Amino acid sequence: MNRLTTPFGSYELTRFPADPRDRLRAWDAADEYLLRHLDAGTGERGPVDLAGAGQITVVGDRWGALTTALAAYHPAQITDSALARAATEANLDRAGIGTAKSTVTLLTTRDAPPARIDVLLVRVPKSLALLEDQLRRLAPHLHEGTVVVGAGMVKEIHTSTLDLFEKVVGPTRTSLAEKKARLIFCTPDPALLAAAGPSPWPLTYTVDQDGGSGAGLTVVNHAGIFCADRLDVGTRFFLQSIPTNTDGARVVDLGCGNGVVGTAVQVADPDAEVVFTDESYQAVASARATYEANVRPGRRTAEFLVGDGVAMLPPSSVDLILCNPPFHSHQATTDATALRMFAQSRKALRPGGELWVVANRHMGYHTHLQRLFGNQEVVASEPRFVVLRAVKREARQHGR
């Protein structure tokens, strides 16, 4: 846990789930820069009168640092991450603020935004597609007087980022860099806001015949889902190997993304009981749409869960888990998410249940699986990717 000191107060903040071994903070220099600007102004732009500003909306708050610091002004937070939302709730509670509607409104990217937005604060996401989707959805709720300020690390803000603000919202410029962070100032143009048009997302494509068990499936991708218009290389390789004759098993597509893996299992085995889970609201919406585009009505109904991996599933309740784990947390490279997924999987699997993982070979996940499960094997490999399989044994078989 670390303390963030801002012009609006000092707060103990953590990511979610909180882990004392995690060296990554719940905020960065871009959050600090934005909060200083709101209080004191930056360059030719003066401070923002938050007390009299009206409705404040914070988009893409990574772990709730901005929402917590600005809670006294009753902001609405819009996030695509269930983990970011959980972190925000925990950080607000720790600060003695809570999440009563009169204090903070927590929304997801799938919810309707506030009817009128007077101050829009945007943490620039990694995905340009997600940024476009957000700006186009929010444009009808902005007005000529809306204060629009974006924030990000210098490496996150590109010419394409600024062009998108300028195209959808209005004239845009950036601040000087401070501690490798930069702000974006955008002046809403009523003509542009009126002409912004709907979001172009979701996109739909059909998996080609080289897509293994996914061949011929229709895939629906909402904005922000990795590899929007085609199968990514890792998933394509995974689909060549995954077991699809599951004999009615309870199967989890863990970190489901657009859901093509779990949908491939369901199409191959109509009796399978498939659960799709991801921390992204956009991902789970994509998985549901992909499933519905390929599975005939009347077949077994799948479950779609937004949250922290399989932590919400009962212990020893799953036969097979299929996982293509991420190795980034925003801009940071980390194996923490994958290792948490593996540990959760072992708990959720029944004895004899299996975890199948596809990953970049250099991540070295085989050593972690061997330590956790007491076994692992390589199912398939090629120069860049490897598919690994681990089986949950009875505790007495390896001293657990």
Image (spheres, rainbow, N blue to C red):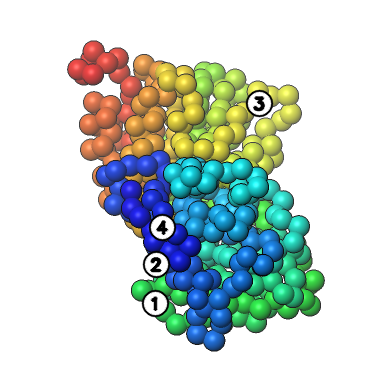
Q: Residue 207: tell me if it is visible.
A: no
Q: From the viewer's side, name the closer residue of 94 and 384.
A: 94
Q: Which residue is mark 1?
A: 178
Estimate the spatial distance between the alpha carbons at disc 2 and disc 3, rounded to whole Å: 45 Å
Pick whichever of labels 2 and 4 is earlier in the sequence. 4
Q: Residue at x 68, y 24 (%)?
A: 299
In which quadrant of the rendered image does the C terminus lie?
top left
Q: Name the amino acid type tagged 3.
A: Thr
> Are the residues at dot 1 and dot 2 in contact (C-beta closer than 8 Å)?
yes
Q: Name the residue tied to disc 4.
A: 10
Q: For the residues labelled 2 and 3, say whether their Cβ atoms are less than 8 Å apart.
A: no
Q: Residue at x 39, y 61 (%)?
A: 5
Q: CA distance from mark 3 to mark 4?
A: 47 Å
Q: Which residue shows up at 30% across the image and 14% down it?
A: 394
SS of the residue under disc 3: loop
**Label 3: which residue?**
301
Tag 1's secondary structure?
loop
To which residue does mark 2 refer?
29
Q: Nearer the viewer, mark 3 or mark 1?
A: 1
| Residue type of the residue flagged with mark 1 | Glu
Give coordinates of residue 58: x percent, y percent. 58, 59
Residues at marks 3 and 1 touching, judged by CB atoms closer than 8 Å: no
Question: Which of 225/146 is in front?
Answer: 146
Type of amino acid at the residue the image marks with label 4: Ser
Q: Is residue 27 above or below residue 40?
A: above
Residues under labels 3 and 1: Cα distance? Answer: 51 Å
